[in-house]
């Protein structure tokens, strides 16, 4: 933008830089929105998992052991400490996924090219897709034991395949955008 005058000032005219910036292709808003939907979905699932962790592990909802303080009464300190450390580590997983999802959503929705971020995201989702397919073919009993069979498996497969596809589209867009910037100077 012209340093001496701002838009709206009397006699303001756009500089050569302003004109070039206005003509530069902008990333598609729809692509940015659709590419961060998986991160928002994983963030929502992680919040649900954390609330479930509080309900089940802390308050003992749906278990016969009761709340954590009721379970701990009368047990040895070593057993209580080791189980509490394990429970806390399990509870930190959904918190970490939620924080990572927020960061990835903000990073993915930004206007600037993030080629390495999207390339890494594409690889992660490709590995997850491959793991789902191999799990279904090679270890169907294990997939059933973690509740990934039938409709649940297809839902997970569609989500990770969609995520991988959107990441690939962002990689292509960022590569072409960076190539145009390199050609410009």
Image: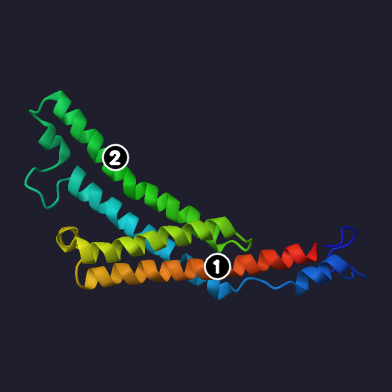
Q: Residue 173, percent across and down?
A: 60, 69
- Percent of width and height locating residue 17: 84, 65
Position of residue 16 in the picture relative to residue 98 (left or right): right
* Front in this rendered view, residue 55 or 110: 110
Q: Quarter-wise, where is residue 70 in the image?
A: top left
The tag earlier along the polypeptide, 1 or 2, is 2
- As drawn, the residue found furthest toward the right would be 11
Horizontal and vertical percent for residue 113? 62, 61
- Residue 136: % across, % down: 23, 66
Q: Nearer the viewer, residue 138 or 25?
A: 138
Q: Residue at x 20, y 72 (%)?
A: 150
Q: Name the residue at 10% across, 49% down.
A: 63
Q: CA distance from mark 1 to mark 2?
A: 34 Å
Q: Quadrant of residue 161?
A: bottom left
Judged from the image, the secondary structure of the residue bearing numbered disc 2 is helix
Q: Nearer the viewer, residue 180 or 2?
A: 180
Callouts 1 and 2 close, C-beta under 8 Å? no
Q: Residues within 10 Å of mark 1 (few under 14, many from 20)?
A: many
On residue 89, the disc is 2
Q: Is residue 7 visible?
A: no
- Which residue corresponds to mark 1? 170
Name the element at disc 1.
helix
State which quadrant residue 12 falls in. Answer: bottom right
Looking at the image, is 84 positioned above or below residue 95? above
> Which residue sits at x=55%, y=67%?
170
């Amino acid at each position: 933008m012209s340093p001496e005058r701002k838009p709206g000032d009397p006699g303001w005219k756009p500089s050569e830089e302003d004109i070039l910036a206005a003509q530069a292709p902008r990333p598609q808003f729809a692509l940015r929105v659709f590419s961060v939907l998986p991160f928002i979905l994983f963030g929502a699932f992680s919040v649900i998992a954390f609330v479930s962790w509080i309900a089940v592990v802390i308050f003992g909802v749906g278990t016969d052991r009761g709340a954590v303080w009721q379970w701990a009464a009368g047990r040895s300190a070593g057993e209580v400490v080791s189980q509490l450390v394990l429970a806390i580590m399990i509870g930190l997983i959904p918190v970490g996924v939620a924080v990572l999802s927020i960061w990835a959503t903000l990073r993915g929705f930004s206007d600037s090219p993030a080629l390495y971020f999207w390339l890494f995201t594409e690889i992660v989702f490709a590995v997850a897709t491959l793991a789902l397919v191999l799990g279904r073919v090679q270890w169907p009993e294990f997939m059933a034991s973690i509740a990934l069979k039938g409709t649940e498996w297809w839902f997970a497969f569609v989500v990770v395949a969609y995520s991988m596809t959107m990441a690939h589209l962002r990689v292509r867009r960022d590569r072409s955008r960076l190539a145009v910037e390199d050609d410009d100077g």
